[in-house]
Image: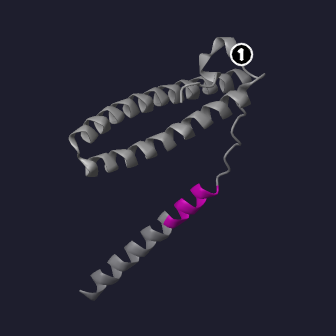
Amino acid sequence: MKITKILATALLTGSLAIGTVGIASAATTPEPPPAKPSQEQLCTRVHNVGLRLENLEERVLTHEQKLTTVRDHAAAEGKTDLVAKIDARLARLRERHDKIAARLNELHDKAQGRCDPAGSSATAPSTAA
């Protein structure tokens, strides 16, 4: 009985040692540095990010209009607790919209002179507020 425990312990210790050596050798393999993206790739990324931000901005504005309608309806019915909750939600939504608009403007400023603005409407800042 003791011999089987000793053999099992030795087998387990050996397999752990071999596994640790394998992990250690795999961690020390050097990785090549990432390749620098070309100007065309950067402009494509700017265009894609701009499109996503514009889509997100449209969704925020649509949601804001819906919430405003619901708030007005709740205020007409005298539901002050609901109006307060909707006002808090509208405030958060407006903060989010301000962040999106700021990011769109920042994106436009960074792309100015580097990417073709005629090829992408996404680099133009949004005027909706």
From the viewer's perspective, tell me whether residue 85 is left or right of residue 113: left
Any magenta on residue 87? no
From the viewer's perspective, tell me whether residue 66 is left or right of residue 119: left
Q: Residue furthest top?
A: 118
Q: Position of residue 82 (x, y in %)?
A: 27, 48
Please name the residue shown 67% across and 23% down the image: 43
Residue 31 position (above or below residue 62): below
Please name the residue shown 49% across and 30% down the image: 57
Please name the residue shown 68% across and 50% down the image: 30
Visible residue check, residue 38: no
Of residues 45 and 118, the one nearer the viewer is 118
Highlighted magenta segment, given as a residue range: 20-28
Residue 111 position (above or below residue 116): below
Q: Which residue bears the numbered disc 1?
A: 116
Q: Position of residue 52 (x, y in %)?
A: 51, 28
Of residues 79 and 94, the one nearer the viewer is 79
Visible residue check, residue 25: yes
